[in-house]
Image (cartoon, grey):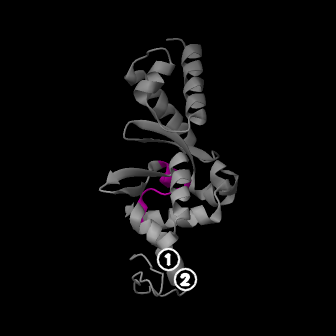
């Protein structure tokens, strides 16, 4: 294979990864390149990963579970996150997302008890954005965050999110309150954390 072809293939993979709203499998990348071997795709991905890992690049190539995607490097996330497409998420929807993430997984029935009927719309919006997924569980849905949620917030796993929430609570000296059951008299409840 000529150097020009390899350079063009590398550019094509970079463009595909940049434009794709979701991680791309090695097979999908091989197909984009016209049916090349997976070993060839792996070599190109490794070249891209090594180059973008070097200082002077704002994002990096990650490969998880055979899927490749670009992500902003952690040291830059705080300074550029406001430019991300999800910035238009209303505060009330973000609160619903935070509750789902902190309790991950959480039943929709429990969410509605705490957040009220408007949370049905929040769940729909979060599903449309790919930040959560819903699986049937009896007469309700079991809600959990997706890999897109982790990528968007620059997290490696859900425990990292819980750690950050705990650190904020500690810094602000917010005591962990005991859960309150919903009653007809109080009409309130806090989800156990």
193 lies above or below 21: below
Q: Are marks 1 and 2 in contact (CB under 8 Å)?
A: yes
Residue 54 makes an appearance in the image: no
Q: Residue 104: x and y, percent?
A: 39, 63
State the separation of the CA atoms marked 1 and 2. 6 Å
- Dividing the picture into quadrants, the one containing residue 30 is top left
Residue shown at the point (45%, 66%) measured from the top left: 111
64 lies above or below 149: above
Farthest left residue in view: 138
Q: Secondary structure at mark 2?
A: helix
Q: Nearer the viewer, residue 179 or 187?
A: 187
Residue shown at the point (45%, 49%) measured from the top left: 147
Q: How many marks?
A: 2
183 lies above or below 55: below
Farthest top residue in view: 1
Mark 2 = which residue? 171
Q: Which mark is residue 167?
A: 1
Q: Which residues are magenta?
A: 148-159
Q: Which quadrant is the C terminus positioned in? A: bottom left
Q: Nearer the viewer, residue 90 or 59?
A: 90
């Amino acid at each position: 294979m000529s150097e020009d072809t390899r350079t063009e293939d590398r550019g094509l993979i970079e463009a595909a990864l940049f434009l794709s709203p979701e991680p791309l499998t090695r097979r999908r990348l091989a197909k984009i390149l016209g049916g090349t071997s997976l070993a060839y795709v792996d070599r190109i991905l490794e070249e891209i990963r090594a180059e973008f890992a070097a200082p002077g690049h704002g994002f990096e190539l990650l490969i998880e579970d055979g899927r490749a995607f670009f992500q902003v490097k952690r040291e830059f996330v705080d300074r550029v996150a406001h430019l991300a497409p999800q910035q238009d998420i209303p505060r009330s929807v973000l609160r619903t997302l935070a509750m789902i993430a902190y309790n991950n997984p959480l039943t929709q029935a429990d969410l509605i008890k705490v957040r009220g009927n408007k949370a049905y719309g929040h769940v729909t919006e979060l599903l449309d954005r790919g930040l959560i997924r819903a699986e049937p569980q009896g007469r309700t849905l079991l809600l959990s965050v997706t890999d897109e949620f982790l990528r968007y917030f620059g997290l490696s796993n859900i425990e990292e999110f819980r750690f950050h929430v705990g650190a904020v609570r500690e810094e602000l000296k917010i005591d962990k309150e005991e859960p309150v059951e919903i009653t007809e008299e109080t009409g309130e409840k806090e989800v156990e954390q």
